[in-house]
Amino acid sequence: MASVNDLMEQDRTLLLVDDDKAFLSRLEQAMIRRGFDVRVADGVDTGLALLKPDPPAFAVVDMRLEDGNGLEVVSALHEMRPGARAIVLTGYGNIASAVMAVKLGAVDYLAKPADADDITKALLAKESEKAAPPENPMSADRVRWEHIQRVYELCDRNVSETARRLNMHRRTLQRILAKRAPR
């Protein structure tokens, strides 16, 4: 009888669930290039609907979605296909939500913005081993810049609203937005 890892190597179906359409599109293309058969959903309801006909072997799910919590998708996938490997992505990580994600069936919990290579390593890691730490992790300045860009996009590129939500002076934010992304 084939092990779970052998089955996962043969079945490369992947469900991506994220309400950030730009990120979802980039990640979809990157995972297709890495040999996955990708299905995408932009919310909990769509993600749950895509599980029903044929649950995928893998899933990458954002925790906070516009229509609910991505952990619902992880839990449903784990019930329908116990051997499936799900990863939770979030920009709002904390220990309690990481523990809950693992209890519901996630095999890993990654902070956004996550690199497609790191996601692939986490998805394909053997059950008994953790994925290796990233070779070239983003600098703290880059993570901060990415977070500011994400909030800026979520605020429909409104500088005043973004500055208010980030508890930052508007002119400081304008200077940051005018600079190139740090490495």
Image (cartoon, grey):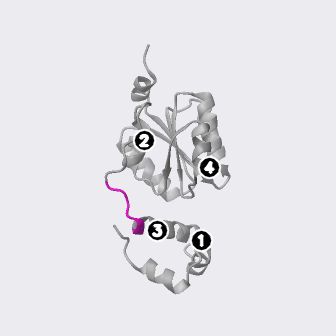
Q: Which residue is mark 1?
A: 155
Q: Amino acid at mark 2?
A: Ala
- Which dot, 2 or 4, sits closer to the camera? 4
Q: Residue at x 40, y 52 (%)?
A: 115
Which is more N-terminal, label 3 or label 2?
Answer: 2
Which class describes the residues within 10 Å of circle 2: few (<14), some (14-19), or many (20+)? many
> Magenta span covers which residues?
136-141
Q: Which residue is mark 4?
A: 96
Helix, strand or loop for disc 1: loop
Q: Residue at x 42, y 80 (%)?
A: 178
Circles 3, 1 touching at the beta carbon (< 8 Å): no
Which is more N-terminal, label 1 or label 2?
Answer: 2
Helix, strand or loop for disc 3: helix
Which is more N-terminal, label 4 or label 2?
Answer: 4
- Which dot, 4 or 3, sits closer to the camera? 4
Q: Residue placed farthest to the bottom in the image?
A: 171
> From the image, which quarter does the C terminus lie in?
bottom left
Q: Which mark is residue 129?
A: none
Give the Cα distance between marks 1 and 4: 27 Å
Q: Main secondary structure of the magenta part?
A: loop
- Choose between 114 and 94: the one closer to the eye: 94
Give the Cα distance between marks 2 and 3: 23 Å
Q: Which residue is mark 3?
A: 144
